[in-house]
Amino acid sequence: MKPLVLNTRAANRVRIAAWSLAALLVLSPLLATSVTDQVAWGVFDFIFAALLIGGLGVGWEIILKATRHRLWRAVLAMALLGSVLLIWAELAVGIIH
């Protein structure tokens, strides 16, 4: 397999879009808390969501720098995403006791 190579300008646009999406994902419950009583997030919830999603982004940046091979990037990205989703699900509904 050929390594995935983007030019610098395109890579920077992708990173800006990804980090902007992460920020919107963290801030979206803020809008929901002002609209409905069904979402009751506190300050700690926003901080933890920011740390979790930010950690996902930093982990992805590390994966991008650590390897150039598409298969390894895919495997590591799935492991990272699976870990974040497992933590999120555990905190949301307590799937592991």
Image (spheres, rainbow, N blue to C red):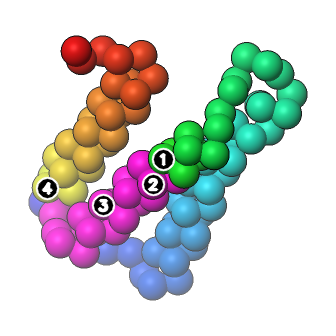
Q: Which mark is residue 74?
A: none
- Under mark 3, the amino acid is Gly
Q: Inspect this view and state whether residue 57 appears.
A: yes
The label number, if any, that marks residue 59 in the structure image = 3
> How far, Cα to Cα, is label 3 from label 4?
14 Å
Badge nearest the viewer, 3 or 1: 1
Whichever of callouts 3 and 1 sits on the residue coming sooner in the sequence is 1
Q: Which-is-in-front pick, marks 2 and 3?
A: 2
* Measured Cα–Cα span from mark 4 to mark 1: 28 Å
Verify CB contact (< 8 Å) between mark 2 and mark 4: no
Sequence-wise, which precedes: disc 2 or disc 3? 2
Q: Is residue 64 magenta?
A: yes
Q: Calculate the distance from the C-alpha at mark 2 to the C-alpha at mark 3.
A: 12 Å
Which of pointers 2 and 4 indicates the residue nearer the eye? 2
- Disc 2, SS: helix
Residue range (magenta) = 50-70
Q: Magenta residues: mostly which secondary structure? A: helix
The residue at which mark 2 appears reads as: 51
Drawn side of residue 91 relative to residue 76, left or right: right
**Residue found 46% across the figure and 75% down from its top:** 11
Residue that carries the numbered disc 4 in the rendered image: 72
CB-based contact (under 8 Å), mark 1 and mark 2: yes
Q: Residue at x 14, y 55 (%)?
A: 72
Q: Earlier in the sequence, mark 3 or mark 4?
A: 3
Q: Residue 56 location, x and y as percent?
A: 37, 53
Along the line of sight, the residue nearer the viewer: 84 or 47: 47
**Left or right of 40 in this view: 80:** left
In the image, residue 45 lies at what x, y percent? 56, 40
Residue type of the residue flagged with mark 1:
Phe
User: Taking 39 as reference, is 88 above or below it?
Assistant: below
Quickly name the residue at label 1: 48
